[in-house]
Image: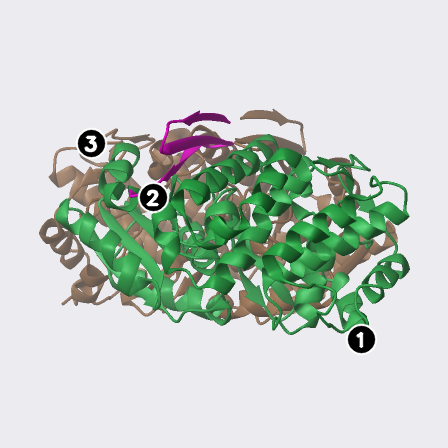
Chain colours: A green, B brown
Amino acid sequence: MTGARGPESTVVEVSTRDGSYDVVVRTGAIAEIPRLVTERLSCERFAIISDDHVAPIHGRAVMDACSDAGLDTSLFTFPAGESSKTRKSWSILTDELLEAGFGRDSCVIAVGGGVTTDLAGFVAATYLRGVPVVQVPTSYLAMIDASVGGKTGVDVRTGKNLVGAFHPPRLVLADPGVLTTLPLAERAQGLVEAFKHGAILDAAYFDSLGDGVADLMAADTDVAGPAVARSVELKAKVVSEDEFEGGYRQILNFGHTLGHAIEAASGYALGHGSAVAIGMLLETRLGERLGVTEAGTHERLEIALEALLGPLDQVSFDASAAVGYLRTDKKVRKGKPRVVLLRSLGEVDPGDGWSHEVSEAVLAEALGAGSGVAG
Amino acid sequence: MTGARGPESTVVEVSTRDGSYDVVVRTGAIAEIPRLVTERLSCERFAIISDDHVAPIHGRAVMDACSDAGLDTSLFTFPAGESSKTRKSWSILTDELLEAGFGRDSCVIAVGGGVTTDLAGFVAATYLRGVPVVQVPTSYLAMIDASVGGKTGVDVRTGKNLVGAFHPPRLVLADPGVLTTLPLAERAQGLVEAFKHGAILDAAYFDSLGDGVADLMAADTDVAGPAVARSVELKAKVVSEDEFEGGYRQILNFGHTLGHAIEAASGYALGHGSAVAIGMLLETRLGERLGVTEAGTHERLEIALEALLGPLDQVSFDASAAVGYLRTDKKVRKGKPRVVLLRSLGEVDPGDGWSHEVSEAVLAEALGAGSGVAG
């Protein structure tokens, strides 16, 4: 991973087993897609995949830019929302591309939030056993998290992201200028992952996010651009070291062992960001109790996350249901749940392979302590 | 790729971007699965996937061998037949494994023919974004072709194998001793791929197969073992040079451009082997007509393949339907169909990236000439 940052543009190179790809963070870059793509890929046809909220705005903009540049481009849409991140939507999109005759020399361009980048990425990963994908994230979550690292996939009844593939993009193009179209609630939910990057890797960045919450929520590109770029740099550094989550990459799961369980127990009524925020707080309180995490870390996290999301100790969830979901978590190893614990703000405790085995009973207690109404 | 052959055992090492894996060809090796697997993999749980014809015989044998060795093993079955090679079967098997709580430290063991190795391989490729798969092929086709090279996938309405992933196995264990349980028709169909290996890479091997047809059909391990081993060596050499079918690997598609189209046009009533055999003959006649293939090659192919399959010029198919299927073939590049042509028996013409662009009109003529009743 190497980075190059200009006054308005950051290009982060992410290493994979198949070479590397660039993440370009630049306001206004959506208009430059045809050049950025054709510099890197020799595809004959382009399939833009976008949900029906984003397609009329940014999907159409990418489509027009590509068509104006003489590229053979088609737009495929699916209904917006996490409920579309399914094997069924994946099947429908795949069949539509097949019926339109897209061959191996095609490229998928995903334009949208995390649902779109994950779903379209999985279409590309499995289409004729794999065609290139260009990720054009249009939400904070997708820019900061979903589009970097090559994870693609869909949700199933048993849980989220349990079916999928590692399929690194050939290019990621994050244009912070599009964030003003993002609903406010989604801005806050997505920014949680930026705070997570700060919490595990860079305390100064964590503090700067806390100071900039109002500007970040306003999607002021002068503040949002550098934040997206910094999160991309941090995430790229991690996934370049450990592409397949064998070890170090697990640190990105901070807050996610309990967060995913809480999110699932809420029937996904609770936003992913809020669930992860609560997960980070509960895992940090647990870490302090176990003597792994520096005392006072929980409080610093809580102040920053509540500035973003409002009071989090009021959020209710079914703790016993959450405990049940822990068992199907991908982070289970040898049947035992594992948790990433901070050593201090900005630093993860190495533990046993970057996470700690914690008994279900201890996690149940940690979850129960997280809510006044928990069962 | 390196090979080591003893009197009764061949181990072929196949290189992939993620390291390498062994293909062990040895009569009686099924009983040694626990040792061979645990020498190479540190998995906590094993999910055997097998169809309901093979499961009671070889699936159960693998299951018992693993259980006796103290491995935590479960057996999952699906209805036998190509009609099970679908996204639906893949979904059902995936859900069954998830519900049984298989985590990332699990391993899939596919026991069966090509449908099973492809389907179970795709389950493994996409389960929690990928878990290891051990391939235990029980048919000629699966031993010779399907289980080497990492191709996994399912069929869709538009065509066969159009959805899938490259997911190299961690070990392939081919035990020619199990071939006696294979129906005779399937033996003949599978052996076509062995003749293909000879036709593209090794004329002496091709001739030896022709001489040994009776013993191969009887599944005499003294003849079947070396043939499986030689085919595995040849295929491994090709896929080690070109894992993702960017160039050289295309030579394995000899007979398949027209063969797949003929198979699809028959509504899959025609066996894959027969369709590929006819495809090889038609592509070779085309090659001779174009001056690419040495004159007389078609005749040598025809004598050998008809000794295996009976008269092939009596087989009828709808040529105009076959032309339609050519358009959705994965081998289409820049919208134009491509065909692998021999230079002579045992050698492929390099063409333009190991295949030739041939117009639809010329292919339609080649297909029409292939059958007295073709439309």
Query: Which residue is the site of mark 2?
Result: B253
Give the CA separation, mark 3 to mark 1: 81 Å
User: Could one spot residue B257 in this view of the protein?
Assistant: yes
Q: Nearer the viewer, residue B295 or B10?
A: B10
The answer to whether A129 appears left or right of B15 in the picture is: left
Q: Amino acid at mark 1?
A: Val
In which quarter of the view is residue B101 placed?
Answer: bottom right
> Residue B306, relative to residue B195: is it above or below?
below
Quadrant of the rendering where the C terminus of chain B is positioned: bottom left
Secondary-structure class at tag 3: loop
Give the CA separation, mark 3 to mark 2: 19 Å
Query: Which residue is the site of mark 3?
Result: B294
> Residue B208, relative to residue A259: is it above or below?
above
* Circles 3 and 2 in contact, beta carbons < 8 Å: no
What range of the chain is rendered magenta?
A1-28
> Residue B283, relative to residue A96: is it above or below?
above
Q: Amino acid at mark 3?
A: Glu
Q: Residues within 10 Å of mark 1 (few under 14, many from 20)?
A: few
